[in-house]
Image (tube, rainbow, N blue to C red):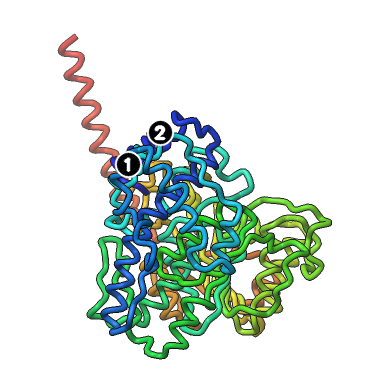
Amino acid sequence: MLAPELKNQIKRLWNKFWEGGIANPLTAIEQISYLIFMRRLEDMDLVHKKAAERRNEKYISIYKGQENCRWSYWINMPAEEMLTHVRDKVFPFIKILKGEDGEFSKAMKDAVFMIPKPSLLQESVRLIDELNITQQNQDTQGDIYEYLLSELQTSGKNGQFRTPRHIIRMMVELVNPVLGDRICDPACGTGGFLINAYQHILKENTSPDVLEYDEDGVPHHLVGDKITDKKQRTFLKERALHGFDFDTTMVRIALMNAILHGIDKPDIQYKDTLSKGYEEKEKYEIVLANPPFKGNIDKGDISDRLKLKTTKTELLFLNLFEEIMVVGGKCGVIVPDGVLFGSSNAHKEARQRLVEDNELQGIIKMPSGVFKPYAGVSTAIIIFAKGGKTDKVWFYDMQADGYSLDDKRTKTPDKNDIPDIIKKWNTRDRKKTPGKGEKWFWVDAKEIKENKYDLSISRYKPVVYEEVSYDSPRAQLKRIKILNQEIIQCLSELEEII
């Protein structure tokens, strides 16, 4: 979460927009996003230039021929001049940043710069500059959006919650996308899964002596110097990552986020992937997602390809993932607990499909506080591969994620199961049984079938009986006699006082 002082600065920025006449919270978020994008764009241009130099590659600045669009060029302009320059020069520049035919330009086509007052722009620019976003850790932009969204007081109406970045990183590690994979998030929000998948691939292809890790264990200097094949590098930056969302604001934010992380041509589109208008099939090797929970979709809008007889989005998305993955493709998805044990025919069929038609590999039960302060919903991670056969399923009972499970979500480094989850997942062996105190265990597919495909961890979690030793009756009787003597002594002393 944001440090208190950083959060206060964001709150001040939010209040400035409110006082400046932009009362619609979603509009404020979008306008703030544009300014953040303008600020980080110049910083990231410099980062990409240095990375290219380390690879001995020629780098062409995105500002070539448009030097007056750099943040550093106009930040100290007088208020009136700044508003005119940003509205008429800088904003049109970022709208066609990746070419007029690219997905970014399509998404930005109807975008409007709506900051009406010179004083509001000048003060907002000053506050954003003071945030030193690029100097913060890589999660800061996402944290800013999360905090802004929390101000809406509507977060979660459709089951939409920003996935904590440490949970995303864990899921990416478990699914382990590799160079050459086509990766999709059909409900991408701000693009966290796609960006972290991209960074994971870069990390795996960056020389260890180049990498640096921050205090949270997040790698930096992801130059991908081991990717020497130009076609592979182009594929990673232009054709590997695909996202969809039915919220135009989220699409714009995700596109800006992706570009700032070095993804040259992000394919992030405005589309309802559960609807008849989405027709992709058997295209992706990797699917990573945290789709909307507990939502419902109009029955007439649901794609005919989805066979589950339900309008519940959390079940339909599971069906969709099967459809869009190639055989052997792997999926990591967050689901509400109800998916694991729900009693409706659709719930049972969804779980049966996971076990019978796919290789259900793992279920990780997460504590209910992971999504606080926005929701106390209890969730789990499902990992499965399309096709194949389910023999055994690996379960893990996560009890801590490195943060307190209350609304404050303060760091608790001594209480964090994530490193253990990743380690045990990567070294899992079907022949091994867990030792004392372990939080993982295997369950045979046969047992799951016998339990009507119930996937709740409580159904299978081994009960650990601890041996309790008691003193012998003779020793207990001796202790009682001594206690009685002490009571009699106390009563005698009390009588003397009275």
* Residue 438 image-quadrant placement: bottom left
Residue 460: give x, y in percent of width and height. Answer: 57, 66
* Residue 221 image-quadrant placement: bottom left
Which element type, helix, strand or loop, lies under badge 1? helix
Name, please, the residue furthest toward the top.
498
* Neighbourhood count class around disc 1 (C-alpha, 10 Å): few under 14, some 14–19, many 20 upward: some
Which residue is rendered at x = 36% and y = 67% of the image? Answer: 419
Q: Earlier in the sequence, mark 2 or mark 1?
A: 2
Residue 325 can be seen, yes or no: yes
Residue 380: give x, y in percent of width and height. Answer: 55, 60
Q: Is residue 229 above or below residue 67?
A: below
Amino acid beneath label 1: Leu
Say which of 49 and 273 sits in front.
Answer: 49
Cα–Cα span, label 2 and label 1 = 10 Å
Which residue is rendered at x = 41% and y = 42% of the image? Answer: 83
Residue 176 can be seen, yes or no: no
In the figure, is residue 394 to the left or right of 5? right
Q: Is residue 215 above or below residue 493?
A: below
In the figure, is residue 365 to the left or right of 414? right
Residue 270: give x, y in percent of width and height. Answer: 63, 60
Q: Which residue is mark 1?
A: 127
Amino acid beneath label 2: Lys
